[in-house]
Image: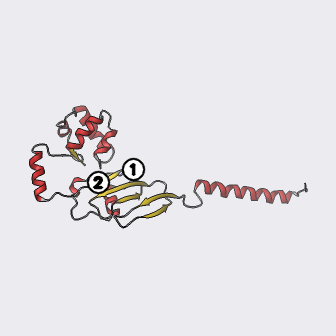
Amino acid sequence: MPEWSRSQLAVYAAIAVALLFVGARSIRGEGGAQPSFAAESGGGSGGGFSISGHGGDLVVDVTGAVRLPGVYRLPAGSRVDDAVTRAGGATGRAELEAVNLAARLADGQQIVVPEAASGAEAASAGAAAGEEAPISLGTASPEELEEIDGIGPVTAGDIVEFREQHGGLASVDQLDQVPGIGPATMEALRGRLQP
């Protein structure tokens, strides 16, 4: 084995430290964007595949009466309105009043923008529903929520508190996270609430 001088050892040590530093940075993602993969689709025209370097993003599924339904990556803290805009905006038949556009998005959330019923459909649906018209999840008071079978004063208060803590609710499915709401209550809520 050859004998190395102190200067040669110092050079080799410096190179080793530099290589370790570069390797550690690339593993942690500080040296460049850390790749994350998200498929983005747009309507029926086929989708693209993107590689993004943002670690705190949300991935949401936007469907229904939007121009480009699909899966989209949005920055953390985005609102439902941002997701609808990213999906090309609402179509002319969209019933945006049924969606809380100000609600914060959650990772993995599905946003459904319903289509407005035609005049005849709305009249027949209204006649069939009678007094059982859906209650708006975004504005319902505890008293209104108590009108739903299986919802008492405590659960109604929990729903309102959960809604306020999360900046609104974009979907009835989010109520599954409220304590005291089981599968049977979720089914009753689906029929009586709208986002």
Question: Is 39 situated left or right of 179 in this image?
Answer: right
Question: Is 24 situated left or right of 104 in this image?
Answer: right
Quadrant of the snapshot with the N terminus: bottom right
Residue 111 visible in the displayed image: yes
Identify the amino acid type marked 1.
Gly
Instruction: Assign a secondary structure to mark 2.
Output: strand
Compared with 3, 165 (above or below) is: above
Q: Which of the 4 image quarters holds residue 156?
A: top left
The residue at the point 16 percent across, 37 percent down is 147
The residue at the point 49 percent across, 62 percent down is 51
Question: x%, y% of residue 141?
Answer: 20, 41
Residue for badge 1: 108
Distance from the alpha carbon under mark 2 to that under mark 1: 13 Å
Q: Foreground residue, 180 or 18?
A: 180
Residue for badge 2: 112
Question: x%, y% of residue 27?
Answer: 61, 54
Compared with 190, 86 (above or below) is: below
Identify the amino acid type marked 2.
Val
Question: x%, y% of residue 72?
Answer: 39, 59
Q: Foreground residue, 173 or 123?
A: 123
Question: Is 114 situated left or right of 105 in this image?
Answer: left
Question: x%, y% of residue 167?
Answer: 31, 48
The residue at the point 36 percent across, 67 percent down is 45
